[in-house]
Amino acid sequence: MKKLRCGIIGCGRIGCGFDDIPSKKLIRTHALSYYKNSKSDLAALCDIDREKLERYSKKFKIKNTYDQSKQMFEEENLDCVSICTTANLHQKLVEEAVENNIKGIIIEKPISFSLNSAKKILMLF
């Protein structure tokens, strides 16, 4: 069975950072959940903070990092993406993911800061 190619946009706390807290049993982030799952391949990370990209690409052994989501979507042929940014960016990122035929889109809460934007995001599915 083919592994799902997964990417993460936003390497902050829920994307990658909470796993900096040592624990052998707990999975606290999207990154570690993909990394430890035998059915997924954490293929790419995207963040505007180059320091986070460097730190977490080493930690999770990821070669492909991006500071532009559009470039990641165009180059990586992902099956799924976790959007772990602030809610004001969610609509734009979901639109990009849909345009690039990403089938699995996970959005961290809240989905949006406005009802109008939330409705637009849901209409994309």
Image (cartoon, rainbow, N blue to C red):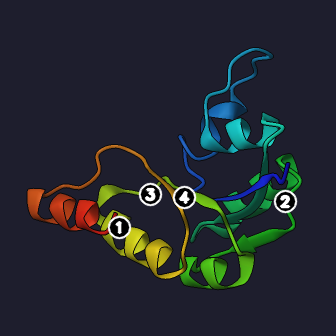
Label 3 to label 2, Cα distance in Å? 19 Å
In this view, 2 is above or below 48:
above
SS state under label 1: helix
Locate residue 41 relative to residue 34 in the image: left or right.
Answer: right
SS state under label 4: loop
Mark 2 or mark 4, which has the lower sequence index?
4
- Residue position for label 1: 89
Q: Are marks 2 and 1 in contact (CB under 8 Å)?
A: no
Q: Are marks 3 and 4 in contact (CB under 8 Å)?
A: yes
Q: Residue at x 55, y 68 (%)?
A: 102
Label 3 to label 4, Cα distance in Å? 5 Å
User: Where is residue 91, by image quadrant?
Assistant: bottom left
Residue 10: image tag: 4
User: Where is residue 110, by image quadrant?
Assistant: top left
In percent of width and height, residue 81 lies at 58, 59
Mark 2 or mark 1, which has the lower sequence index?
2
- How many discs appear? 4
Mark 3 or mark 4, which has the lower sequence index?
4
* Amino acid on which disc 3 is placed: Thr
Label 3 to label 1, Cα distance in Å? 7 Å
Label 2 to label 1, Cα distance in Å? 24 Å
- Residue position for label 3: 85
Closest to the observer, 52 or 97: 97
Q: Are marks 3 and 1 in contact (CB under 8 Å)?
A: yes
Closest to the observer, 103 or 64: 103
- Residue position for label 2: 62
Q: Are marks 3 and 2 in contact (CB under 8 Å)?
A: no
Label 4 to label 1, Cα distance in Å? 10 Å
* Amino acid on which disc 1 is placed: Leu
Quick one: label 1, few (<14), some, or many (20+) residues within 10 Å?
some
Quick one: label 2, few (<14), some, or many (20+) residues within 10 Å?
some
